Image (cartoon, grey):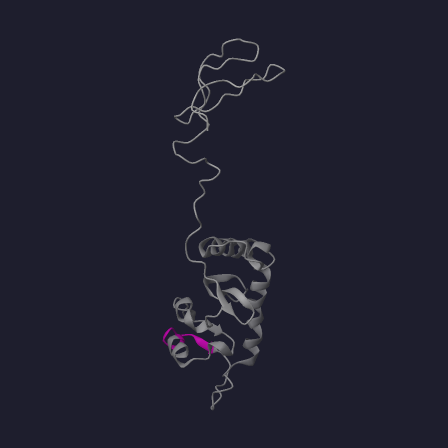
Amino acid sequence: MARSARALPALEDGLHAVFALERAGHLAAGSRLSDGRRRYGRLSHRRHHRTSSSGCARSAKRGAQQIGHSRGGASTKIHAVVDAVGRPVCLALTEGQRHEMTVAPLLLAGIRRAYVIGDRGYDANSLREQLRRQRCRVVIPSTTSRRRKRPFNRRLYKRRHRVENFFQRIKRFRRISTRYDKLAANFFAMVCLAAALTWLL
């Protein structure tokens, strides 16, 4: 970077002459036009008050990413609770290898007096007891490892496809299906935006 205010050769067609930068980091003041006339006033400051240029001073993307390694590779898991129509009520984000039961008690903590439908992955005694205390009806089939199979309403269980329909709708947003965002906060914000749109459409 030059430290003097010496002007470079003037450009043609009456354009402003290009001046080198001063030591303070600002463009030279009181420049002349290419035809020799004096320019009144000062040129606007094109730089911020910092040592590096604005193009190179990009903040590093730091923070939680919520990206784990599952059987399918690096992935992020979206947990959702939807109502009877398939609209999202509560959402959460974890690494891809984490089990659904790690966040299920928290997601279902605010559900009262409702039918709770889930797949076999949610068949846990602790979750069933929590839902009973919340006056909910549990519609979850038993796992294959459970010796005594618990009865459940098969007619209501057929409505579980509505949560799958919700995931199918938000995955229409390519930014969600392919995880463009690095940080979990940015990715989860896009998930919430797509979920909000399902209430409007």
Q: Let me know if residue 81 appears in the view.
A: no
The reply, left or right, for residue 150 in relation to residue 162 is left
Instruction: Identify the residue at image location x=59%, y=65%.
Output: 165
Quarter-wise, where is residue 2 in the image? Answer: top left
Decide which of 131, 25 is in the foreground and name it.
Answer: 25
Q: Which residues are magenta?
A: 131-138
Which residue appears farthest toward the right when viewing the image?
13
Q: Any magenta on residue 4?
A: no
Near-viewer residue (178 or 132): 178
Where residue 46 appears, as percent x and y from the top left, is 46, 27
Image quadrant containing the C terminus: bottom right
112 lies above or below 33: below
User: How many numbered dots are placed on residues in this image?
Assistant: 0
Q: Position of residue 142 (x, y in %)?
A: 49, 83
What residue occupies the far top of the structure in this picture?
Answer: 37
Report x, y in % for residue 7.
50, 18
Membership of 133 in magenta stretch = yes
Within the image, what quadrant is residue 57 found in?
A: top left
Left or right for 22, reference 190: left
> At x 52% / y 64%, what residue is drawn?
75
User: Is any atom of residue 65 visible in this view?
Assistant: yes
- Image location (x, y in percent) of residue 184: 46, 57
